[in-house]
Amino acid sequence: MCHSKNHKGYLISHLVIYLSRMGFQLYHVLLQTLFGHSSTQPAKSNHQLPSMRPISTRSKTGSLSTVSILFFAMFLTACENDDNDHHNPDYRLSTPINRTLIGTAAVGIPVKGDISIIASDGKTLNTQSNINGKYSVNLGGQPGPYLIRVEPDDNSLPALYSYATGSGVTNITPFTTLALFLAYPNDFPNSFNNWATLHSNWNPTSLKEARAKVNANFATQLQNSGVDPIVYDFFTVPFEANQTGIDAFLDNYNVSFDYNAKTYNITNSSGQPVTFNEHINIANYYIGARFLPENTAKWKLTWIPEFDGQQGTAIVSYPGNNVPWSEEQFNEIFWKKLVETPSQVTTCNENSNIECNINVLVTHLDTNYNVIGNGEVGTIVRGNGIYNWNMDGWYQQDGQSRQNVDKSTSWVFSWSWERIS
């Protein structure tokens, strides 16, 4: 058993309670996503991290216990030696956040123009698409989700819109605009000017359904363009604006919008109207899927969190298809609480016996997603990421002197889903 030589380690442990909530909420979201209200219990947990016991065996709804968070935080930090806090010149985790968003803006022909990307905090990133319709921008620590608009240099072309949950590929086309319009007709006219307020009203399920409706209405045409309408994603699949493949498909249609009247009109290359069925059956569409999920499948999930070098493992076996079969789904489920909170100020207002004012600044945020296989037994779905932040400010507990805080923290997450039957 370890013993703290001074009070600072204990104070820091309390601080980590507040700052580590995001990671625990993330794990809770993971289990809730897999099990919902089910009573299914994880098959195994490694108790190397004491906190893993109360968390990994919980599958009912409800918030995480402050006691379990405290147990974890104290385990990690109470034994820190105050003399060793900052003798390492590299103690600050100052790796720049480099999260790149790239894509193609096109209406068949490439669209060159000014691109604005609104983060969920309302701040704007600006870039330009080139003569080939290509654009690239570093999202840095700006929180998602992001609403995107391109205003073409060619005044005869309308503004086009798109949406991204994180870094990677996001195209901007008439059909990304159409999907957004179908999903959020009430908010869409004002969303770009009020994204910080309205983005929380946007249910991701509505956009998934709208994407599927677009594909279902143009299923034959998409097949003729060489893509599978069941999984093809206009938003995230890279393409060249060279009048072949999916770009040739874009050439064949014109989509116009009246945002105030909440109407749209689709015509073909001959100017003839195209009927669009908003109630078309989309039951078996999995837009963006790397493989088609099966209800009868069974998967084993291995979750490995690491906090400042302390590692733990939880292994869960479960039935069903609730596995992140697309990178977007992975980001939505498992990274939402992280990427939406790049910085914050903690005031410790949950405990009347504690006062603090801590500035939290994310210094490194990186995620990765990969699938090995096509959904058959043995398929492996992997996700991992690094999330570092710096904390500075002060902390005070009743009856104790105020303590200054200057600490760097690192979360490393790794998931692996393996289909076992």
Image: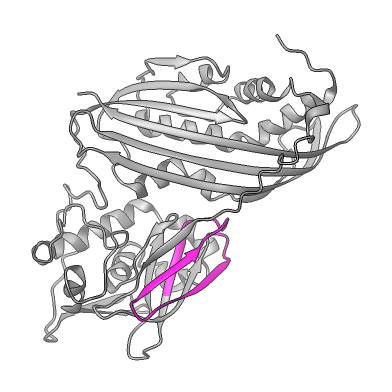
**Vertically, is 143 above or below 32?**
below
Q: What stretch is highlighted in magenta?
A: 120-149
**Vertically, is 131 above or below 288?**
below
Whether residue 91 appears in magenta in the rendering, the answer is no
For the view shown, which residue lies furthest in the top direction?
1
Residue 281 picture location, percent across and down = 14, 54
Asked which quadrant contains residue 242, the reply is: bottom left
Residue 248 picture location, percent across and down = 17, 74
* Closest to the observer, 35 or 410: 410
- Answer left or right for 390 relative to 321: right
Residue drawn at x 69%, y 22% as measured from the top left = 74
Asked which quadrant contains residue 23, the reply is: top right
Residue drawn at x 44%, y 40% as measured from the top left = 334
For the view shown, which residue lies furthest in the front direction?
89
Q: In which quarter of the image is the N terminus?
A: top right
**Vertically, is 28 above or below 40?**
below
For the view shown, which residue lies furthest in the bottom direction?
155
- Answer left or right for 291 relative to 158: left
Residue 12 picture location, percent across and down = 75, 30
Residue drawn at x 25%, y 30% as measured from the top left = 320
